[in-house]
Image (cartoon, rainbow, N blue to C red):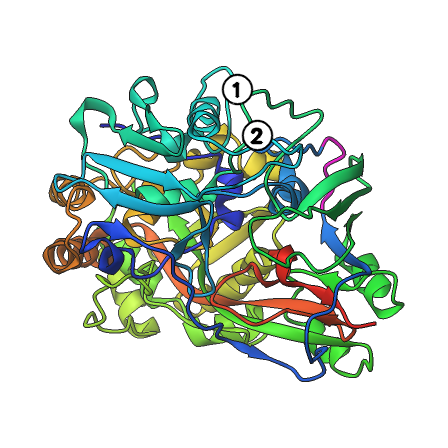
Amino acid sequence: MTVPSPDPSRRRFLGATAGLGVLLGSGLLTACGGPDTGSAAGGAASGKPRRGGRIRLGIIDVNQNGDLDAHKPIGNGSIIRGFALYAKPWEWNAQMQPALTLAESAEISPDARTWTVRLKQGLEFHNGKTVTADDFVFSARRLTDPELASPYAGLLSYVDRDRIQKLDDRTVRFHFRNGMAFVPFPENFTNFGGIVPVDYDPRKPVGAGPYKLKEFTPGQRSLFTRFENYFRPGQPYADELEIIDFKDEQSRIAALQSGQIDLANGIAADQIRLLGSSDAVHTVVSRTNGWQGFELNLSKPPFDDEKVRTAFRLLVDRQDLVDRALSGQGRIANDLYSPQDPTFDTSLPQRPYDVARAKKLLREAGAKDLTVELVTGPDPTSESAALVFATQARKAGVTINVKKVDSATFDGPQRTDFTLSTGELLTESFLVTGLHLDAPGSNNNKTHFSDPRFTKLFNQALGEPDVAKRTPLVHEMQQIQYDKGGLIIWGFVNNVDAVAKRIGGVTAEHTQFPLWRFEKLWVAG
């Protein structure tokens, strides 16, 4: 079955999950939390959360056409605003696991061909209407409506939208197309925008999130007020949440330092030292499994030659890239994604940095003095990594010409035609990440990786809820990717957030979401 990927520009916003297979072993997914992890500089507001005040978040978003649609967000700002307005059956917890929120239970059938989800009792939308199974069904069908053309639609494309069953006022059963078995259903539902009422109008949005909309000016700012009947008792704490759009990092950091905003999410690592001298701001560093890398197009010369592919992997000085492109805020990777997945094969040897062997392989492939173009988008980390790699490759006589293009070009239809390009993803479990990248059916397979044995194993693993039985399948797939794949994943990236010391409730996680958990944040004074 073909499972389309979502809009490629969403790569940088997708989350990760760990341990889903463990939760599925009993067939029942129950509410889970887990301790917050990571590291943070001192100086955060302490004590008991207090109610009141306004929290001001500064985001980078150059899109003047941003919207508030739960299922068709335009740009980064629209996705972040969705965290204030909407609530989902599951959300990513601090450990990047799908934890139940609006749902009280979710049960997978023994054959993995259906999921039955039951909503909590007494849930309310912002307009006072009770959240019911009808709303859940409507939201899933709207999300997958071809006429809407949601960037999230690919996440649920395997759902048979004509067989979504309402079992009672709070319970919904999902079937999959063509009798397909599909284990990672909760992860994909965690990524979409939320449950909305059956009379939903995105121009006057109503959700069940922690804040209600008060004002919205696309490309400039949005203002939200506390939803008093939010499903988490006592939250959110602040009276108001303001999200302010900035066009560049320099102006946003200046606004943070001058006290015009309280929060800045996902700042560049090189800003940590600058903010370290501030008496009013501290940084929160979260260790994530989001990766940075290079994607080799295996359908084009020179990367249709396995020796050239191997040589390029050996030319990557991974620690140097972490030190220079990430300013040390990360750790080296081994060309494989989803290290947090319980099925991940930790026994594969770390790829060495070996210029001499790389030069030998290039000579054998007739690719001595090779020149290749490396395409990168506007992401500054990816651009920096591309330039660092170009200097590394010169040691083997390889010339890499870095070409920077805009987002429309980098994420457009031609993205799968690049011979060599930068890549990044905020990693999910192995199976879902594969659906975004290089598994059978992905329409975002920039590497054009295709292997018959891998395809057979992947389809088998999708229907295997038992993590112990799924593990050997994934191990064999990862060995194939390690030997024959087109991904050079050189590092995993830390997420760095900047927080005014008057704001409490921000804790380091294994996610990029600490500042987006708006219900937890509070103003100290």
Q: Amino acid at mark 2?
A: Lys
334 shown above or below 131: below
Q: Earlier in the sequence, mark 2 or mark 1?
A: 2
198 shown above or below 448: above
221 shown above or below 384: above
Provide the residue designation for mark 1.
148
Mark 2 neighbour class, 10 Å CA radius: few under 14, some 14 to 19, many 20 or more: many
Left/right placement of residue 519 relative to residue 136 reads: right
Instruction: State the residue in front, 86 or 172.
Output: 172
Left/right placement of residue 452 relative to residue 176 reads: left
Magenta stretch: dominant secondary structure: loop
Q: Amino acid at mark 1?
A: Leu
Q: Residue at horizontal 75%, vertical 56%? A: 57
Can see residue 262? yes
Can see residue 447? no
Mark 1 neighbour class, 10 Å CA radius: few under 14, some 14 to 19, many 20 or more: few
- Verify whether residue 289 appears in magenta: no
Residue 72 is labelled as: 2
Left/right placement of residue 380 relative to residue 250 reads: left
Residue 482 is labelled as: none
| Quadrant showing the N terminus | top left
- Region rendered in magenta: 61-65
Asked whether the residues under the numbered discs 2 and 1 touch, taking CB atoms below 8 Å apart as contact, a structural biologist would say: yes
- Verify whether residue 63 appears in magenta: yes
Give the image quarter of residue 451. Answer: top left
Q: How many marks?
A: 2
Q: Residue at horizontal 76%, vertical 55%? A: 58
At which x and y percent is residue 4?
36, 30
Q: CA distance from mark 2 to mark 1?
A: 8 Å
| Quadrant showing the C terminus | bottom right
Instruction: State the residue in front, 242 or 158.
Output: 242
